[in-house]
Amino acid sequence: MTPEEQKTIDRLIVSINKASSRPWRVFFMGILSGIGSGIGATIGLSILVAAAFYFFKLSGLEQAFHNTLQTMKELAGTLKSIR
């Protein structure tokens, strides 16, 4: 093992010891990491939904979808009145 590799391993060991010797720090870093992941997922999903909605409107399927929902609403009303 070269001295440079040994130096890198020693620094890694010191970093691991620092991180594991403070359980509250590990706990809060985990919380912050989870919050960051949640925010990132929310932003990513928002972008995907916005893009899908934009292309949905752009394709002209909005009116067809609206008509289908109206038909389903009328059908549900008819079935409800039959009861």
Image (tube, rainbow, N blue to C red):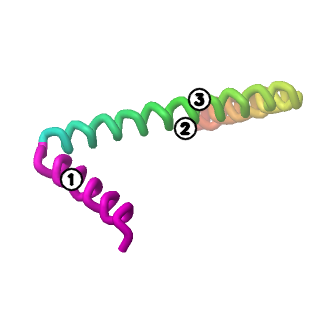
Q: In this view, does 63 lie above or below 80?
A: above
Q: What residue type is labelled 2?
A: Arg
Alpha carbon distance from label 3 to label 2: 41 Å
The mark lying in front, picked from 1 and 3, is 1
Q: In terms of sequence position, does the residue under pointer 1 or pointer 3 come before the other? A: 1
Is any atom of residue 67 visible in this view? no
Answer few, some or many: residues within 10 Å of disc 3's Cα (few below 14, many 20 plus, some between 14 and 19): few
Look at 29% across and 56% down and name the residue there.
12
The residue tagged 1 is 14
Label 1 element class: helix
Look at 31% across and 35% down and name the residue there.
32
Q: Is residue 3 above or below residue 37?
A: below
The mark lying in front, picked from 3 and 2, is 3
Identify the magenta region. Answer: 1-23
Label 3 element class: helix
Q: In terms of sequence position, does the residue under pointer 2 or pointer 1 come before the other? A: 1
Look at 23% across and 58% down and name the residue there.
13
Between 73 and 32, the one nearer to me in the picture: 32
The residue tagged 2 is 83
Q: Does the magenta stretch include residue 82?
A: no
Mark 2 vs 1: CB contact within 8 A = no
Q: In this view, does 46 lie above or below 16?
A: above
The residue tagged 3 is 46
Q: Which SS type dominates the magenta stretch? A: helix
Q: In terms of sequence position, does the residue under pointer 3 or pointer 2 come before the other? A: 3
Answer few, some or many: residues within 10 Å of disc 2's Cα (few below 14, many 20 plus, some between 14 and 19): few
Between 20 and 36, the one nearer to me in the picture: 20
